[in-house]
Amino acid sequence: MSDVVPKLASKLPQGVGNGLAFRASRDIEHTDDVLVAIVLYTPDKLVDKLNGTTELHYRIERIEPIDITADQMMLRSIMQSAAGRRVGQDRLPDELLEVEGLAFDRARESDYEEREAAQDDLLKHGSGVYLSHGDEASQ
């Protein structure tokens, strides 16, 4: 069997399947961030090349950006487990861990900074609403 080279279709899903359309206006301010999404895809077509390779084109059917601050530990565990099975190693290669860290560690810093700013604002103004995970609104 010839080598199979994966290729990605050039179009994103149309309509509600494209969760990036919802996020684009927010993400424009964070062009250096590594973001997390769940992608549903299908193998679309095979193209046999003259050099003996076969290209398998994938089509993205749906893409859902994830707010990883809410479910960070679960998502990171799923991602590490899937990558470990794929590469056949318990310890993932550094290049995979580096990109993963950019996404998950930055989200944790951002979540902490947002909570700290909200608490500071509440203390300065003496009133307002502050919500924390699982808390009821407090005045």
Image (cartoon, grey):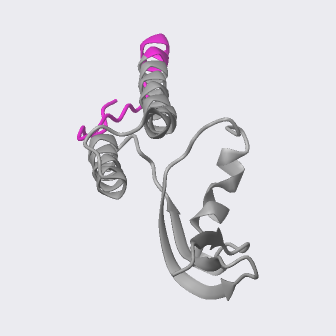
Nearer to the camera, 59 or 114: 59
- Whether 66 is drawn above or below 15: the answer is above
Residue that appears at 46% across and 34% down: 107
Question: As displayed, is residue 15 above or below residue 34?
Answer: below
Residue 82 position within the rendered picture, expressed as x and y whole percent measured from the top left: 32, 56
The boundaries of the magenta stretch are 120-139
Whether 6 is drawn above or below 61: the answer is above
* Quadrant in the picture for residue 129: top left
Residue at (48% x, 22% y) in the render: 113
Indicate the position of residue 63 as horizontal and vertical percent values.
Answer: 54, 67
Of the pair 32 and 118, the residue shown nearer to us? 32
Asked if 46 appears above or below 23 in the picture, the reply is below
Q: Is residue 18 left or right of residue 78?
A: right
Quadrant where the C terminus sits is top left
The residue at the point 46 percent across, 53 percent down is 66
The residue shown at (61%, 70%) is 5
* Count of number-bearing discs: 0
Examine the structure image and report whether residue 122 is included in the region drawn in magenta.
yes
Residues 83 and 21: in front is: 83
State whether the magenta stretch is mostly helix, strand or loop.
loop
Instruction: Judge from the rendering whether residue 34 lies leftward or rightward of residue 21; answer left or right.
Output: left
Residue 48 position in % (x across, y down): 68, 86
View extreme (top): residue: 124
Asked if residue 117 lies left or right of residue 31, the reply is left
Q: Is residue 75 magenta?
A: no
Q: Is residue 23 left or right of residue 100?
A: right
